[in-house]
Image (cartoon, grey):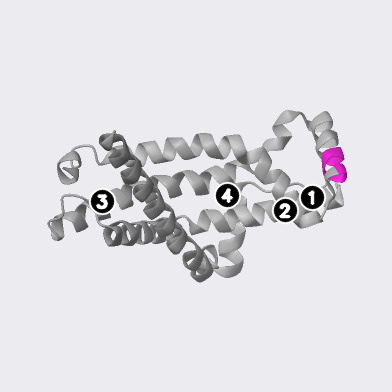
Amino acid sequence: AFINKLGDNDYIPLIAGGIARLFSATIISPIEMIRTRMQSRRLTYTELLARISTGVSQNGWLSLWKGWGPTILRDVPFSALYWYNYEYFKMSLCKKSSSHEPTFLIIFSSGAAAGSIAATLTLPFDVIKTHRQTELWELDIIHSPQKKTRSIWEVMKRIVIENGFTGLFTGIIPRLSKIAPACAIMISTYEYGKTFFRRLNKDK
């Protein structure tokens, strides 16, 4: 039964979620960088490829991973917190309702709650990432050798000085409005698909 499988290894979703996100975020980081540049500059594919080629020739292949640090700081804790809390809420709700298997409502509610917690706790990293990306875009447009990007710590200090600690939680309502239902729908679809194919294999 589902309830008997959890308890002693609660930390596994935390570690597995964080490691999986670390690898996936690292792999797609260049694609994310290309996407944000296209959106910010409205470049054609030819112009974009020319800029990427120039950047790689001048700064090496690692230039494709600009902004990797803030992305990892946001995404890895998010996934770790999300999967840990999702499994915790799912197990708790199953115990309270005396269900041996999670229902759709339990899965959906657990996904939404876990997504909300992860989104709130990692919002400061998302704000820092946005500020850092903006600086990189401005530097790319100005092409000024004197203008240097600030570190993650420097960006965070500037936000706190200018807007207080609440500045690190700017945009919390839109973020929750997007992430809570998205996480609930994603995990419900995943769990339904997993259950469907598991039963299908048993029937064979």
Q: Residues within 10 Å of mark 2 (few under 14, many from 20)?
A: some
Mark 2 highlights which residue? 135
Q: Quadrant of the C terminus?
A: top left
Sequence-wise, the earlier of marks 2 and 4 is 2
Asked if the residue under mark 1 is in contact with the one under mark 2, i.e. CB atoms within 8 Å, the reply is yes
CA distance for labels 4 and 3: 32 Å
Q: Give the image location of residue 119, x and y in percent.
A: 45, 58
CA distance for labels 1 and 4: 19 Å
Q: Residues within 10 Å of mark 1 (few under 14, many from 20)?
A: some
Please tell me whether mark 4 sits on a helix, a strand or a loop: helix
Q: Disc 1 residue type?
A: Leu
Residue in the image at 51% along x and 64% along y:
178
The range drawn in magenta is 46-51
Mark 3 highlights which residue? 88
Q: Main secondary structure of the magenta part?
A: helix
Q: Give the image location of residue 5, x and y in percent.
A: 19, 39
Sequence-wise, the earlier of marks 3 and 2 is 3
Q: Disc 2 residue type?
A: Glu
Please tell me whether mark 3 sits on a helix, a strand or a loop: helix
CA distance for labels 3 and 1: 44 Å
Please tell me whether mark 1 sits on a helix, a strand or a loop: helix
Q: Residues within 10 Å of mark 4 (few under 14, many from 20)?
A: few
Please state if 10 lies on the left or on the right of 178 as rendered: left
Q: Disc 4 residue type?
A: Trp
CA distance for labels 2 and 1: 6 Å
- From where the camera sits, is residue 93 visible? yes
Q: Which mark is residue 153?
A: 4
Q: Which mark is residue 4?
A: none
Mark 1 highlights which residue? 139
Residue in the image at 26% along x and 55% along y:
89
Sequence-wise, the earlier of marks 4 and 3 is 3
Q: Give the image location of residue 155, x and y in percent.
A: 62, 54
